[in-house]
Image (cartoon, rainbow, N blue to C red):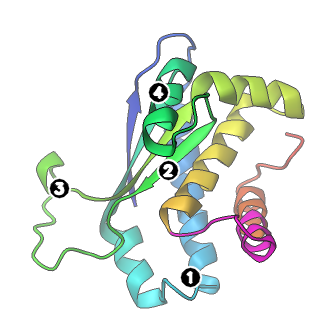
Amino acid sequence: MKIAFHNRQRKLNLDFDEMQQDFAALAEALGENLEQKPPRWLPKKALRPIFARGSLSVVIVSDRIIRQLNKEWRAIDKATDVLSFPLELTEPATFDFEDNEENNWIVGEIIISAEKAVAQAAEYGHSVRRELAFLFIHGCLHVLGFDHMTEAEEKEMFGRQTEILAAKGFKRQS
């Protein structure tokens, strides 16, 4: 899966090269995890095109921007750490996969608050890098249809998060 980064905040200086490498590795681990244990709504034949030809947009924003988006899309007037917007999990039937911006099949968009990531990293006692990795995987799973509204959903989603993060060395206390 291709990942397009957009930095739309100016408060924090983040290492986007490192973030891109981390997120690419995590997306690969996510694909492997789902391939081994596909969810009932995404069989292997649906997963392969997502990870082979799909794109994911990741936008890093300020608390002010994520609060506006959270209010607009979820009617919650407060900043949150991550928002996920699933777009299209089914490969378009007539699609030109030439490698250019106009022909990207965008699977979803993840919006992460840089300020929340920093605050939560301090609160949980781990690195900002680990917190960004967590928020990215959490957002990816939401884009792909996972949720945590029930105890069973939470157990599956959070279990996968832990497995994927651990597979790439992002332990809780890193």
Asked which secondary structure carries label 3, the reply is loop
| Residue wearing tag 3 | 99
From mark 4 to mark 3, how far is it between C-alphas? Answer: 33 Å
Residue 84's tag is: 2
Q: Earlier in the sequence, mark 4 or mark 2?
A: 4
Residue 68's tag is: 4
Report the magenta residues as a range. Answer: 145-158
Q: Amino acid at mark 2?
A: Ser
Q: Earlier in the sequence, mark 3 or mark 1?
A: 1
**Residues at circles 3 and 2 in contact by the CB criterion of under 8 Å:** no
What residue is at 40 percent from the left and 37 percent from the top?
5
In the figure, is residue 93 to the left or right of 76? left
Q: Quadrant of the C terminus?
A: top right
What residue is at 57 percent from the left and 14 percent from the top?
12
Asked which secondary structure carries label 4, the reply is helix
| Residue wearing tag 1 | 35
**Residues at circles 1 and 4 in contact by the CB criterion of under 8 Å:** no
